[in-house]
Structure formats: structure tokens, C-alpha cells
Image (tube, rainbow, N blue to C red):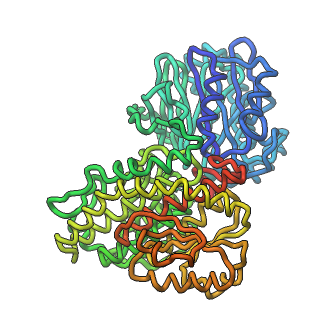
């Protein structure tokens, strides 16, 4: 979703801001803008709806410069994607400018009050309210001290500006990651966070600001993660962090691990393709150091629960959104089968408003790639409030969900830039498999069974590598069916969530309507959709329900529907001419099949989207990190 980047230091910041915005593109956006403040010429704003190139074209017409500036990519919530609604928003007739991520829930009453006080609104956004609100408090400060120069302001530690920002924040309901710059003070950025991530990069005579670490690549690896309710006062040479209500805090400077900032495409045409092909390595990274063959179990460093506590778990709730929810469904099959603990999988957006009767032995896992998804965070908080242990399975280190959970499992899959989640999904499934093994070995799984599961997990990255060899076949199939307007994805047992995930991938990036179903359920309605232009993708590797799925395939064929089968070599022989197209994948145990079958479904979505000329890494209307409700 929206992204923020900022700089104050010794160099001109315009190029850095534009490059930083490009690094944030993956989060999803529909407009962008920057503001600079300089000692000689005051404050300048440029903004444009559409891709960042539109902003760059506008910048080429101006002479914007400055050693302090902030930029923003907007994902529309209040008001359409237009130049006017883009950030930065100017407050108080040009006194200051604000960029903002998040949603201000009480913006209407605030707007009415500010309009009545004479502030003139130009946009339909909630952010403009923040800009005028801060301006209104800032004007009160100015009235008390009209002669504040940049020098005297610095001598006061920017306290008058902080007071104006703090007073405004206390009036806001909702979420924000925001940055404020002031026309008359070209050496300070004030940033604040509540429910929307912000980091400050610490350089030598310069500081950076961003909504995630990616824009800091090449600038610094020293980083401060702001916490909720914190305000940062940032100049070239100083960083002051304070709690909105409680005063000064220590700025905890951490060193960013290099793998979290590797964000180039490594020669691939798209991030999504790179991330699909990275999966043998990302799975190795997820499993590294966690498999314990000598004890025939898995081991996690950060669960923060004792063996006794884990043994007393009687029910597990897995929650998340989108692809992470699908991984949760895989987890349900895994944990119930391997650990025999009842599992419920809940959409986080529903769980946060439900009041489920959960007893004391309930353990909640929030599953999330970004660690910032607003619904997942809210569901987790609600579960915590009800007194349940909540753990996170997340990819982004230091993310809000990871920080707020009692403990958890990091995926270590590296940054996922493509908006459609690929490697995070397979790593989530691998983490859940290890978790099921760990919980199972505390219960009824024998050492022999545990050792077999470990062997299968260790072999998994090579199997994924082998699965990736279907690339050329999938590409040809994609060319054949890219014109179709509806697809069905069908699978059973472990491959039912795989079918849902395959359909979601196709929808997201190719804009083709696709539905995932348990294969047998198809008879109860969706079969009405079947015709010669509606392909059915059967995810039917092998196993107990193989023959049943073949019968479902017959039913589709009998109605003239094209059949694409994803299956192992034995399965391919059995299916024969029943399928119009076959994608062969290696054989693995049934509980690992969703990881292997994800590969051809990801590639199929990718090549169909490519064939249709879609913007694979930045699909329309979607955001990488959904930080609004
Ligand atoms: C699908 C996709 C989304 C996310 C969902 C949750 O490809 O990317 O459906 O899975 O928005 O995001 P996280 O996992 O970051 O909580």
C-alpha cells in the first residue's frame, strides 16, 4: 500500500526520493509525489496520478531541489487517484506538508471543524485533515513566538514543532505513519507512527526515513524501527525519538541483515518470476537449523513457549488473509494429521469482529508475509486481549505482527517484492509442516515417523527444483488458454487449498476469473460453468483420492471442458488422454504436495498474465501490504 521515503542530509535529495519511491512500487500504488524544502527557496511540491514516470516527467519541468524532502506513493482510500488527491498535502496555506500512510477514521468531524475555522480543503483525502490540523496547532505556536528562526528553533530542540504535531496526533483516531516538513525550517522532518510501519535510517551526516527498509539500500544499513506512538525528530546530524505522551526514548539502532535488502531482479524479467525460481533456496532458508534428525523432530528458537505449555495446547487457530489464509488451510490438514490437534482456520478480517468461544488451551497463529496486514494485526490483538497465546508466522523481521506476538517463526524467505505472493506461501507451508512435526512428536508421532518426515523435508528443495523444470511446458499451456475468461482449479485434501491458491494467483495478475473448489464439490454448482472455453486445472498428483479425482475429470470431459492436469509421472500414465494437457511434477508425500503443486500454478498464472500483457509485479488495484481495514 502507500509508501513513504524521506531524506535530510548533505546531498540533494530529489534523485534519492524518486529512487526510493521506485523501490516502494511493489507495495502497490496509484499516484506519487514529493516535497522538498530548501534554505533559499522554501517548500516545493510535485505530484502526479499514475506511475512514477509521470511524476518524473513533471519533475523534469521544475527545478526542484533541496537537502530535505519526503516522497510518497499513494494507494487510494479516500478519493480517487488524481493529482490533487496524491500526497504530499499542504497545510495552512503552505506552512507545511504531510505524507501519510494509514487511515484517519475521524477525518469527517475534524474536517468540518477545520473548515469552520477557515481552512480550505482541496482534496478528498483524510490526509489533508492531518496537514491542516497540524497547521492549526502550529499557528498557535507561531502566535506565541512569531520570530522563531531556523536557528532559534534548532536551539529549542524543535520543541514548538513537536508540540504542534503531538497535539494533532492526540486528536486522530485511526492509523498513521506520517512525515511532516515545514516551509520555514529546512533542516527538520518530524515523523510519527501508529499502526503503520516507519523506519529511520542513520547515516553519516544524513538520515533517511521510509515505510520499509527497501529504499535505504545503498544509503545505510543502520536502522531504527519506530514503535507505535513514537515521534521522531530528524535532522541531518541528530535523531530524537520520543513517545507521544511519555517523552524521551532511546533510539535503538539495529543493523539490517543484508539479505533483507537484496531487492534486484537478478536478471529475471519480473520479481515474481525471480521469486518463483528462488523457492528451492528460500525453502532451505526456512528450514535451516530447524530440523533435528537426532531427535526426529523440529526445533524453533522463538516460540517462547515451554514444552509443557505446548503439550497442553488443545486447539489451534490459524488466521491470516489471502495467500496466508490458504497456507493456514494447508496447516489445518498438516497439524490435524501429524499432531492430531483440532485446528480452525479463520479469515483475520472475520475473526477480529467475531467472539468465538475459545478455551484456555487455545494457541493462535497469525500467518503473514508482510507482518503488517491490518486485519491480521487486529485479529491477533483481539486474541491477545482475550488472553490467548498468539504467535506469528511472518516473513518480515521486526514487522508489527512479529513484534506484538508472544513469539513466532520467521520464514527467512527474503524480501518478496512481486505483489502476488509465491515464495512466502511455500515457506509458510514448510514452516507449518515443521510445526506439525514438532507438535506431533510431543504427542503420538513415533521417532521413525518423525525421521521419515525429516528426510522428506530435507529432499524438498531438490524436488522443487525438479518441479521448476515444468516451466517450458507451462508456458506453452499458458499460450493456449490465455484467451479464456474463466478457469476452475480443482483438488482434494491437501490439494484443495492448493486449488484455492492457484485460482487466486491467476485472478490477481491476469484478471481472469478463477475459482478454486474441492474437486468433488464441483458437481454441486460450478459444473454449470463448464464449456469448451472454461479450462479446469486439476491438481491431482497421486495418493488416496487419486481415482476419485479422475472420476471428476471424466465429468468435466463429458461436458466438453478442457482439462489441464498437474500430476506426477505415474498419475500422467493413468490420466492419459483424459487430460488435454499434463504438467508433470515430482512425487512427494501428500502433506508436501501443496508446496510442489504451487510451482506449476504460480508459473501458469505468471505466463498467462504475461501473454495478456498484464503488469505482473504490480497488478491493478492490489497492494503488497494491506495496511487498511
Ligand atoms: C496474494 C497476496 C495477498 C496476501 C494477503 C495477506 O498473492 O499477496 O492475498 O497474501 O494480502 O498478506 P500478508 O501475508 O502480508 O499478511
Q: Is 388 situated left or right of 210 in this image?
A: left
- 129 in relation to 183, above or below: below
Q: Is 596 situated left or right of 107 in this image?
A: left
- Ligand 1 positioned in quadrant: bottom right
Residue 323 visible in this rendered orientation of the protein:
yes
Q: Nearer the viewer, residue 266 or 133?
A: 266
Q: Which residue shows up at 66% across the image and 83% down it? A: 527
Q: Name the quarter where the C terminus is drawn.
A: bottom right
Q: Which residue shows up at 63% across the image and 21% down it? A: 13
x and y percentages locating residue 408 in the rendered image: 36, 56
x and y percentages locating residue 204 in the rendered image: 46, 17
Q: Is 265 situated left or right of 480 in this image?
A: left
x and y percentages locating residue 309 in the rendered image: 25, 68
x and y percentages locating residue 281 in the rendered image: 38, 47
Q: Which residue shows up at 50% across the image and 67% down it? A: 326
Q: Nearer the viewer, residue 485 or 579?
A: 579
Q: Which residue shows up at 55% across the image and 33% down it? A: 215
- 214 in relation to 501, above or below: above
Residue 91 visible in this rendered orientation of the protein:
no
Amino acid at each position: 500500500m502507500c509508501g513513504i521515503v524521506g531524506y535530510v542530509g548533505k546531498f540533494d535529495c530529489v534523485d534519492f526520493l524518486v529512487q526510493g519511491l521506485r523501490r516502494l512500487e511493489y507495495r502497490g500504488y496509484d499516484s506519487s509525489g514529493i516535497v522538498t524544502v530548501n534554505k533559499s527557496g522554501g517548500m516545493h511540491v510535485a505530484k502526479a496520478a499514475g506511475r512514477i514516470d509521470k511524476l518524473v516527467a513533471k519533475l523534469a519541468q521544475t527545478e526542484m531541489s533541496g537537502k530535505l524532502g519526503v516522497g510518497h506513493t499513494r494507494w487510494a482510500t479516500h478519493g480517487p487517484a488524481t493529482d490533487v488527491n496524491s500526497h504530499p498535502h499542504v497545510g495552512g496555506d503552505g506552512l507545511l506538508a504531510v505524507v501519510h500512510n494509514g487511515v484517519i477514521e475521524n477525518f469527517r468531524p475534524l474536517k468540518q471543524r477545520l473548515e469552520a475555522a477557515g481552512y480550505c480543503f482541496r482534496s478528498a483525502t483524510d490526509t489533508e485533515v492531518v496537514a491542516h490540523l497540524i497547521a492549526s496547532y502550529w499557528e498557535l505556536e507561531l502566535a506565541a513566538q512569531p520570530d522563531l528562526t531556523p536557528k532559534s528553533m534548532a536551539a529549542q530542540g524543535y520543541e514548538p514543532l513537536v508540540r504542534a504535531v503531538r497535539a494533532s496526533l492526540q486528536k486522530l483516531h485511526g492509523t498513521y505513519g506520517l512525515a511532516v516538513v515545514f516551509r520555514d525550517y529546512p533542516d527538520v522532518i518530524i515523523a510519527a507512527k501508529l499502526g503503520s510501519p516507519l523506519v529511520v535510517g542513520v547515516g553519516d551526516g544524513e538520515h533517511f526515513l521510509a515505510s520499509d527498509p527497501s529504499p535505504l539500500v545503498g544509503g545505510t544499513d543502520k536502522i531504527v524501527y519506530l514503535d507505535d506512538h513514537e515521534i521522531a525528530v530528524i535532522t541531518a546530524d541528530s535523531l530524537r525519538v520520543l513517545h507521544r505522551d511519555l517523552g524521551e526514548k532511546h533510539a535503538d539502532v539495529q543493523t539490517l541483515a543484508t539479505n533483507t535488502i537484496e531487492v534486484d531482479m537478478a536478471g529475471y524479467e519480473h520479481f515474481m518470476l525471480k521469486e518463483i525460481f528462488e523457492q528451492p533456496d528460500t525453502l532451505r532458508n526456512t528450514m535451516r537449523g530447524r530440523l533435528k534428525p537426532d531427535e526426529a523432530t523440529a526445533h524453533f528458537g522463538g516460540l517462547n513457549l515451554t514444552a509443557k505449555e505446548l503439550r497442553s495446547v488443545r486447539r489451534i487457530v490459524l488466521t491470516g488473509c489471502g495467500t496466508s489464509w490458504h497456507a493456514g488451510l494447508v496447516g489445518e490438514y498438516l497439524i490435524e494429521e501429524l499432531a492430531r490437534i483440532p485446528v480452525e482456520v479463520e479469515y483475520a478480517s472475520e475473526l477480529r469482529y467475531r467472539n468465538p468461544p475459545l478455551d484456555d488451551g487455545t494457541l493462535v497463529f497469525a500467518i503473514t508475509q508482510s507482518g503488517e496486514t491490518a486485519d491480521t494485526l487486529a485479529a491477533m490483538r483481539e486474541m491477545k486481549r482475550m488472553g490467548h497465546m498468539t504467535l506469528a508466522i511472518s516473513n518480515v523481521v521486526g514487522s508489527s505482527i512479529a513484534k506484538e506476538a508472544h513469539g513466532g517463526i520467521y520464514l527467512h524467505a527474503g524480501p518478496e517484492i512481486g505483489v502476488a505472493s509465491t515464495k512466502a506461501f511455500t515457506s509458510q507451508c514448510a514452516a507449518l509442516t515443521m510445526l506439525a512435526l514438532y507438535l506431533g512428536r510431543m504427542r503420538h508421532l513415533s521417532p521413525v515417523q518423525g525421521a521419515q518426515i525429516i528426510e522428506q523435508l530435507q529432499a524438498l528443495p531438490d524436488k522443487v527444483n525438479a518441479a521448476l523444470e515444468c516451466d517450458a511446458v507451462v508456458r506453452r499451456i499458458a499460450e493456449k488458454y490465455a484467451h479464456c475468461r474463466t478457469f476452475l482449479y480443482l483438488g482434494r485434501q491437501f490439494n484443495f487449498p492448493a486449488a484455492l491458491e492457484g485460482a487466486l494467483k491467476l485472478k490477481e495478475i491476469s484478471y481472469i476469473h478463477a475459482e478454486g473448489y474441492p474437486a468433488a464439490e464441483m458437481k454441486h454448482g460450478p459444473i454449470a460453468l463448464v464449456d469448451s472455453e472454461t479450462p479446469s486445472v486439476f491438481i491431482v498428483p497421486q495418493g488416496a483420492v487419486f481415482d476419485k479425482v479422475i472420476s471428476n475429470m471424466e465429468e468435466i470431459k463429458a461436458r466438453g471442458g478442457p482439462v489441464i492436469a498437474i500430476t506426477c509421472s505415474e498419475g500422467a500414465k493413468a490420466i492419459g488422454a483424459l487430460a488435454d494437457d499434463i504438467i508433470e511434477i515430482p512425487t512427494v508425500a501428500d502433506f508436501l504436495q501443496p508446496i510442489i503443486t504451487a510451482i506449476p500454478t504460480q508459473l501458469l498464472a505468471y505466463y498467462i498474465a504475461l501473454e495478456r500483457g498484464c503488469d505482473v509485479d504490480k497488478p491493478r488495484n492490489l497492494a503488497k501490504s494491506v495496511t487498511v481495514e
